[in-house]
């Protein structure tokens, strides 16, 4: 059975024909925003990306990161800690007409997954009626999460193989599973502070290899 | 390119977080008073319910309830069994029943900004029958839910 494909969609998915070879090498990038947050705030992630360059148009990629949180609320005294790796696979597409120039306007999709353990404690919690100190301790509660990301980003060649660029990502939760009856999680490695959807930004330093 | 940069900057700035603590965030067990026919009943006697703190002193959980059809009581955070004293009194008599509620306790977490609390599952129920005819567990889950009744209490109709 033949399926008619709109010409614009066909054009979107095919590589431009010119004298530049299809395989243009690999690039390694590192997110500086997440790393800064991981070092200087309650939560963040160290994230690296290995990207394949196909004709400066399509960039299949794999992202691997390590997310961590160690946060305590000053008012409620709740403390939440977790640390775990996460993985993403996806692809970016360069939307600029001048594909082989020093700039790229990238849009992309990613699927992401993490398996992690949540720890929640609230020291010194006193029962208001019975007047004793209750032990509030959720220890190593196993959790898993799948989510999708839509990314829009800019990338500029700075010098030699070095690129710098921003990306903004909308993260949408697909599924989350927490074992045990402890309620909700606060931070998910790679996803960020938990909600159904959130927007994050990255600032990437990239080296062509 | 400049327009795209401005759009991305705005999107980053407006991506803010919010605190989503439940508005109703207290955990109570809910009781309804019934007569032997199974219809709701205004409590004719004055009912005071108290329990014993860990230091041995008493604390009142319901103070001199009268003419009430329903009431609610706190649940201890982590004790495996709550012991409650139901003190019924009027001009003719003054009696106390003891109620023992066995339960499992689960720490419940909403967010860092929300107060820590416990949910419970009632697993057993015992009571004396001086003024209480029977006490029935209707819903074993004690949590933020305030629209269901956990216990049906049937006072002794001979009194």
Image (tube, rainbow, N blue to C red):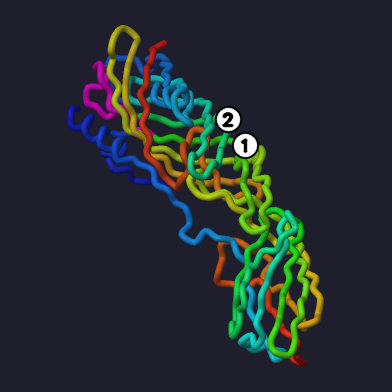
Q: Earlier in the sequence, mark 2 or mark 1?
A: 2
Q: Residues within 10 Å of mark 2 (few under 14, many from 20)?
A: some
Determine if residue A191 is in view: yes
Magenta segment boundaries in residue numbering: A93-108
Name the residue that disc number 2 marks. Answer: A84
Return the x and y of residue A168 as percentages of the image width and height: 34, 33
User: Who is closer to the viewer here, B126 or B44?
Assistant: B44
User: Who is closer to the viewer here, B104 or A60?
Assistant: B104
Would you say the residues marked 2 and 1 are in contact, meaning their CB atoms lie under 8 Å apart? yes
Figure quadrant of the C terminus of chain A: top left
Q: Residue at x 43, y 27 (%)?
A: A37
Q: Is residue A70 above or below residue A207?
A: below
Chain where mark 2 sits: A
Residue B34 located left or right of residue A69 = right
Determine if residue A14 is in view: no
Residue A117's label in the rendered image is: 1
Residue B91 located left or right of residue A89 = right
User: Who is closer to the viewer here, A51 or B84?
Assistant: B84
Say whether residue A140 is magenta: no
Labels 2 and 1 share a subunit: yes
Secondary structure beneath dot 2 equals: strand
Secondary structure beneath dot 1 equals: strand
Q: Residue at x 49, y 31 (%)?
A: A88
Say whether residue A94 is magenta: yes
User: Based on the displayed image, in which of its 4 quarters is residue B57 positioned?
Assistant: bottom right
Q: Residue at x 72, y 57 (%)?
A: B104
């Amino acid at each position: 059975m033949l399926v008619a494909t709109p010409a614009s969609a066909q054009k979107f998915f095919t590589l431009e024909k010119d004298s530049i070879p299809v395989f243009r090498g690999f690039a390694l990038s590192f997110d500086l925003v997440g790393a800064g947050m991981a070092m200087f705030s309650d939560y963040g992630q160290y994230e690296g990306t290995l990207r394949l360059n196909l004709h400066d148009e399509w960039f299949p990629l794999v992202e691997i990161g390590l997310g961590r949180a160690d946060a305590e609320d000053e008012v409620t005294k709740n403390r939440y800690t977790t640390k775990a790796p996460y993985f993403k696979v996806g692809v970016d597409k360069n939307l600029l007409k001048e594909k082989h120039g020093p700039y790229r306007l990238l849009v992309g999709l990613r699927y992401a997954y993490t398996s992690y353990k949540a720890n929640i404690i609230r020291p010194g919690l006193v029962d208001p009626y019975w007047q004793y100190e209750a032990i509030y301790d959720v220890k190593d509660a196993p959790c898993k999460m799948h989510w999708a990301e839509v990314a829009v980003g800019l990338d500029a060649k700075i010098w030699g193989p070095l690129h710098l660029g921003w990306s903004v990502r909308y993260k949408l939760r697909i599924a989350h599973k927490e074992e045990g009856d402890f309620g909700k999680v606060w931070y998910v490695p790679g996803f960020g502070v938990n909600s159904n959807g959130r927007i994050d930004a990255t600032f990437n330093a990239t080296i062509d290899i | 390119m400049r327009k795209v940069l401005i759009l991305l900057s705005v999107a980053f700035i407006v991506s803010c977080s919010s605190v989503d603590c439940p508005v109703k965030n207290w955990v109570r067990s809910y009781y309804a008073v019934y007569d032997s026919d199974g219809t709701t009943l205004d409590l004719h006697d004055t009912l005071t319910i108290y329990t014993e703190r860990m230091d041995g002193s008493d604390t009142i959980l319901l103070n001199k309830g009268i003419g009430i059809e329903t009431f609610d009581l706190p649940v201890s955070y982590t004790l495996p069994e709550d012991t409650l004293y139901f003190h019924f009194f009027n001009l003719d008599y003054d009696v106390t029943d003891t109620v023992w509620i066995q339960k499992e306790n689960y720490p419940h977490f909403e967010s860092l900004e929300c107060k820590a609390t416990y949910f419970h599952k009632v697993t057993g129920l015992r009571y004396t029958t001086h003024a209480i005819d029977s006490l029935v567990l209707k819903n074993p889950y004690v949590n933020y839910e305030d629209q269901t009744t956990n216990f049906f209490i049937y006072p002794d109709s001979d009194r």
